[in-house]
Image (cartoon, grey):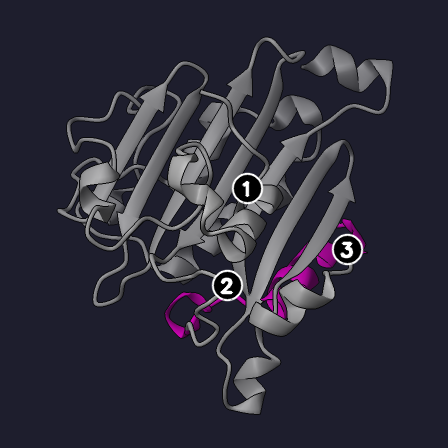
Amino acid sequence: MPRVPIIAALRTAVLLPLVMVGCVACLAAKPSDTRSSSMPSKVDSPMHDATTPPSPSDRTGEIAPETIVKRLLEFIRATQSVREMERGRFWTALALPPQVLSDRQYFGEEEGYQSFSQEIADTRWSYTVSFSENSNDGGSRSARLSFEHPENRNQNTDIDLGSICGVDIEAFRKDMKAAGFSEMRQEPSQFEYESKGVSSFGFRRNGILVDVVAQREAAQPEAKRKHLCVLGVEVRAFSDSPADGASH
């Protein structure tokens, strides 16, 4: 199954809800009455091997949105080169999936792709983290995090992101710059920004590119309208030199 870039997928969820009916590969939010049934089956995870040990503190617990973003940031900080963009390192850094899954936790796996999803307690939000390896594309690899809500469409401009906004874009940007990443801000279209406050950001270091989609916390009050929350992150390994290319 082809995977689409997270920037394009999240923008599609915001701007083109009608097109999403037939798009099963996009990272858009699931309808509220089918969200749980559309998630992967909850059975013993094949991701538990010598390279991906679960964290003892999370063997029976759920992982808060703020925690999952911070663990992803730690993985990004520690990935100093293309060759370090590895599946085992990713799952170890995120301490996922837990050894014992709760009723709100799921995993998925297919050739070249592994994912872990969790519904966030007492909300309609969920998140998915995943790692992809494409042997048909020079060994390209990407890691993703996306927050999803069944009503996060462009016609619902009142969606509230407060429950997933433990790490906002300013904290994320500060962390990236402290780790030596250069920023490449991508200006949003007027419609995207005015309807949902959606903005895109890019960070780059040593063959690693990080794309971030942020969305305003809420339509009101003004302080929340100006506060941008991290909605999705994609980390990609790319090559500018023969040395980097060999490391794939």
Give percent across and percent down for residue 120. 27, 58
Q: Nearer the viewer, mark 1 or mark 3?
A: 3
- Going from N to C along the chain, the mark reached first, 1 or 3, is 1
Residue 207 forms part of the magenta stretch: no
Query: Helix or strand or loop: what does disc 2 sit on?
Result: loop
Report the residue marked by disc 2: 154
Which mark is in front, 1 or 2?
2
Q: How many marks?
A: 3
Residue 137, given in percent of the width and then of the height, sits at 64, 13
Question: 103 or 94: which is nearer to us?
Answer: 103
Image location of residue 163, percent across then percent down: 37, 70
Residue 92 is at least partly visible in this image: no
Marking on residue 153: none
> Residue under circle 3?
186
Spatial separation of the CA atoms under disc 2 and disc 3: 20 Å
Point out the image quarter for the C terminus: top right
**In the drawing, what numbered circle is on residue 75?**
1
Residue range (magenta) = 160-185
Measuring from the top left, give residue 96's x and y in whole percent: 34, 38
- Judge left or right: residue 205 versus residue 133: right
Q: Earlier in the sequence, mark 2 or mark 3?
A: 2
Q: Mark 1: which secondary structure?
A: helix
At 33% from the left edge and 57% from the top edge, which residue is drawn? Answer: 150
Q: CA distance from mark 1 to mark 3?
A: 23 Å
Q: Is residue 184 left or right of residue 115?
A: right
Decide: is 91 above or below 121. above
Residue drawn at point x = 66 percent, y = 68 percent: 193
Residue 142 vertical position relative to residue 57 in the rendered view, above or below:
above
Is there any visible trace of residue 163 in the rendered image?
yes
Magenta stretch contains residue 177: yes
Amino acid type for the residue under numbered disc 1: Phe
Q: In the drawing, does residue 127 fall left or right of residue 187?
A: left
